[in-house]
Image (cartoon, grey):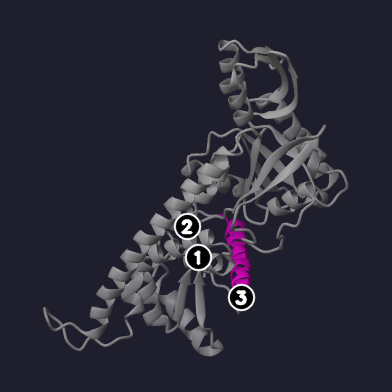
Amino acid sequence: MGAPLKSQPAEVTEEHLQELERLADTAGVDVLDSFVQRLDHPHHKFFIGEGKAEELRDFVAAEGATLILFDDELSPAQGRNLERIVGTRIMDRAELILDIFATRARTSEARAQVELAQLQYMRPRLTRMWSHLSRSRSGPGMRGPGETQLETDRRLIDHRITRLKGELEHIARQRQTQRKGREGQLRASLVGYTNAGKSSILRKMSGTEVFVEDRLFATLDPTTRAIEVGEGAEILLTDTVGFIRKLPHHLVASFRATLEEAAEADLLLHVIDASHAVWEEQMEVVREVLGELGMGERPTVLVFNKTDRLTHEEEQALRERDFGQPSIFVSTVEEGALEPLRELLHREMDRIRPDVHLTLSSSQGGLLAEIYREGEVLHREDHGAEIHLRARLPKAALGRLRSRGVKVYGGG
């Protein structure tokens, strides 16, 4: 059931419903039909008009449908009122996405994140879930079994939410420790709309097995691989969970720890499915979510993927556009079509962590340890009281070393 505002173009509405159908397929739901009602504004009681709700009721009775999916997030009261009039289960887009995440979470971290988001979504809707229980008695000391259970459930949920937040804070601290151990290498993160091809890029570039599926939200857990970018140099590339329009706020908040992998990256690779009919809208959705996560100002390169599905004219028109950000064009299908990305990463590594020669005294053990900790030592020779190194180091570290008497050759 789609209920867009009348100002929304018909083709956009159709695309949104097609995406909802793909979400339904990912969740294992068979779609019987779709309905649209264009609104001036959502109805406070049913979101849609009462007449359209009665039309859904008649369809449910005739076809035996057991679930109605709404493309927009419903308030607890709207969901409760719709279920009463329609006579079957109502699920909005946010709950459907949470359900998909729950079935696809593989690690303990992802499962904790999804459970937290589900509980935060569920808590204000508990009344609706208990509406089938009798409330024959009311008033202080005379409460019905449903209301008593409702209060018990709220306390249990609040307790569980507190525990899950504590677990995720602990995991976030562990991640921070792990990231400190990787500070000597360039880190890049793949971000983008779900099913844009991020996992395919990581698998192709790393030559390792990474789960890939042509379905929405195939990847929930971040996967990091070492990638060779030429001349024996390596960078760390991380695949992250895909975004989608109307992503539930609770889900974005609960996945914040996972997405810190992207927040801590030296470079974001915003992967875009260039062959998708509404790639521009998808690109804006990703930018909005990155902004919400405080990552809107991170150095970013637009990676237009699936160029094998474009005509030469379509690709040329894209290449000629000014996006206000660096952009490259790749494919995981065509041979050698990922080389532009590999070359870009090599250039970024040279820019952020230049290859330099260092000379320091053997008595400067503290500085030597700092070089090993912050950079990547490529070669070392000890000549009496002097140590000669070839290393890759962040430019900020080079400035500090120069100021403390280390001879630095190269690096600008």
Most foreground residue, 1 or 107: 107
Three-letter amino acid code at disc 1?
Leu
Residue denoted by label 3: 28
| Mark 1 vs 2, N-terminal side | 1
- Res 251 label: 2
User: On screen, 191 above or below 58?
Assistant: above
Q: Position of residue 359 (x, y in %)?
A: 69, 14
User: Is disc 3 placed on a helix, strand or loop?
Assistant: loop
Q: Nearer the viewer, residue 133 or 161?
A: 161
Give yes or no for residue 18 being in the magenta stretch.
Answer: yes
Q: Check contact, mark 1 vs mark 2: CB within 8 A.
A: yes
Horizontal and vertical percent for residue 341? 76, 38
Taking the spot 41% from the left edge, 71% from the top edge, the residue there is: 49
In the depicted structure, whether residue 196 falls above or below residue 69: above
Is 363 a magenta residue? no
Image quadrant occupied by the C terminus: top right
Element marked by disc 2:
helix
Q: Which mark is residue 98?
A: 1
User: Which quarter of the figure has residue 372?
Assistant: top right
The amino acid pointed to by label 3 is Gly
Query: Label 1's element?
Result: helix
Which residues are the magenta region?
Answer: 9-31
Q: CA distance from mark 1 to mark 3?
A: 14 Å
Label 1 and label 2: CA atoms lie apart by 7 Å
